[in-house]
Amino acid sequence: MATERLYYADCYLREFEARVVAAEPAPGGFRVYLDRSAFYPESGGQPSDRGALGGIPVLDVVDEGDRLAHLLNRQPESKTVKGEIDWRRRFDHMQQHTGQHALSAAFEKAGGLKTVSFHLGAETSTIDLDSDRVGRRQIEEAEELANGVVFEDREVRILFRGAGEANRMDLRKPTEREGDVRLIEIEGFDLSACGGTHVKRTGEIGTIAARRIELVKGNTRVEFVCGYRALRSARRDFLNLSEAGRLLSGAADQVPVLAAKQSQELRAAVRAREKLAGRVAEYRVAELLFTVPLRNGRRVVRHVFSAEELLEAKMIAHAVAKQPSAVALVAVKGTQGAKAQDVKAQGVKGSSTALFFAQSAGGTADMSALLRQTVARFGGKGGGTRDFAQGGGVAEEKLEEALALAESLL
Ligand SMILES: [Zn+2]
C-alpha cells in the first residue's frame, strides 16, 4: 500500500494522525509504514525529517518508491499513531531548499549557469554550477538577484501537472518523471519539478548568502546559507573577526591589513633570527673545533643537540664544513618539540629526530653513503650529496650511539 505523502500538498503540516499498516524488523529497530505521512524522506539533496510517531523518536525516513519507511527503535503500540515533525529542523530545510531554487534560478538568469547538483548539509548547503569559470562578480550578481526576490516576498506555489504538459511549460530543467509531476513555482521567477519541502513565500527564506566557492570536477561548487543559518554565520564571522582584531590590537575591519603587516613582520623576524643563529653557529663551531683533536688529518665534530637547537644544528653542520679538513656529525633530539617553522624550514617533518652529516668541500668521505649506512643500522632514513646529507627516524636514545658508529666508519 502506497503512503500518501501529506507534505506534497502541505509543507506546513507539523502534526498528523495515521494508521500503521506494517512494521518490519530492520537493523537498528523497525521500519514502520503508515497509510499517510507528513515525514519527508531523504531525497533530492534534502535530508530526511526527524520527530516522533506515537511518542517514539523517528531516526530516519526512507523513500522506497511507493512507500515511506519510518525507522524507529521500537514498534508503536497502537494501530493509530500521532506523527509530530521536528519543526525547527524541517523549517530550516525549507528555508535552505527554497533558497536553493531562488539561487539556482538567479545563476541561470544572471550568468546562464546551470545547477547540476544540490546538497543540503548540516551546516551549509552547496550547488554545483556547470562551469569552471565562475568569478566573485558573477556570484555577487546572482546573490543580489536572489535576495531581491526574497525582499519582494513572492508567492511560492505547488502545482501538479502531467509530465507531458509540465515539459511544455517553462521548466528550469526538463523533468524525466512520468505521470503526475509536482512543480514548485516562485511567482514570475522560477518553475522547477521538485518533490521537496518549500516555504510559502520567498520572504520566509530570509537572507541568501553565498560563502566559499571551489572547483569540483570541472564544476564550480558554491556553498550558501539561508535564513537562520545566514544570521548565525554572520554573527559567528563577526565574533571571529572581532577576536582576530582584538589579538591584532585593531578593529574587525582592519584585520586583513593588520594580519598582512604582522605576517610581514614575522617573516622579517624569522630572517633576522636565522641570521643571528648563523652568527651563533660560527662561534659555536670555533668552540667545538677547538675541543676536538686533529685525527688522521681532520677534525670531527660530533654532537647531539636539543630540539630547540634544530635551526642552529643544521647551520653548525654547514659551518663546520666551511672549515678546512673538518667533518660534522650532528643530531637533534625530538624535532616534534622544535618550533614548527624550523621543522618546516629544515624539511625534517614527520621525524622525531634529525641527523646532519657534512664535510669540507672535496673531503675524502661520502656523507650520503655514511648517513645511509648509519640509519640502516638504527632504523631511520635519509640521504643527500657527497658533502652534505640529512636524515631522521633514529630513536632519541640511540643518537649518541649512531654518531659514534658513523665516526668509526669514517
Ligand atoms: Zn525543491
Image (tube, rainbow, N blue to C red):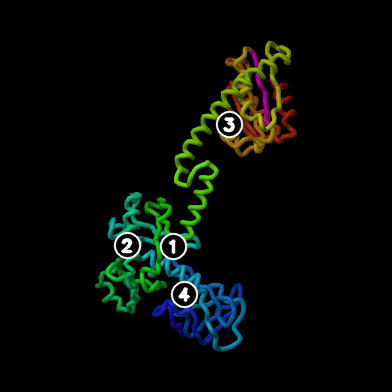
- What's the CA distance linking mark 4 and mark 2? 29 Å
Q: In the figure, residue 75 lies in which quadrant?
A: bottom right
Q: Tag 4: residue type?
A: Tyr
Judging by the rendered image, the residue that carries numbered circle 3 is: 346
* 60 lies above or below 210: below
Residue 49 screen position, x and y as percent: 50, 73
Badge 1 marks a residue whose secondary structure is strand
**For marks 1 and 3 on the same chain, the one whose residue lies earlier in the sequence:** 1
* 29 lies above or below 283: below
> In this orientation, which residue lies closer to the viewer: 136 or 299?
136
Residue 244 screen position, x and y as percent: 52, 46
User: Which-is-in-front pick, marks 1 and 2?
Assistant: 2
Q: Is residue 273 magenta?
A: no
> In this orientation, which residue lies closer to the viewer: 256 or 122?
256
**For marks 4 and 2 on the same chain, the one whose residue lies earlier in the sequence:** 4
Residue 148 numbered tag: 2
Marks 1/2 in contact by CB < 8 Å: the verdict is: no
Marks 3/2 in contact by CB < 8 Å: the verdict is: no
- What's the CA distance linking mark 1 and mark 3? 42 Å
In what quadrant does ligand 1 lie? bottom left
Q: Tag 3: residue type?
A: Gln
Badge 3 marks a residue whose secondary structure is helix
Q: Tag 1: residue type?
A: His
Residue 406 screen position, x and y as percent: 70, 24
| Image position of 228 (left or right of 336) | left
Judging by the rendered image, the residue that carries numbered circle 4 is: 40
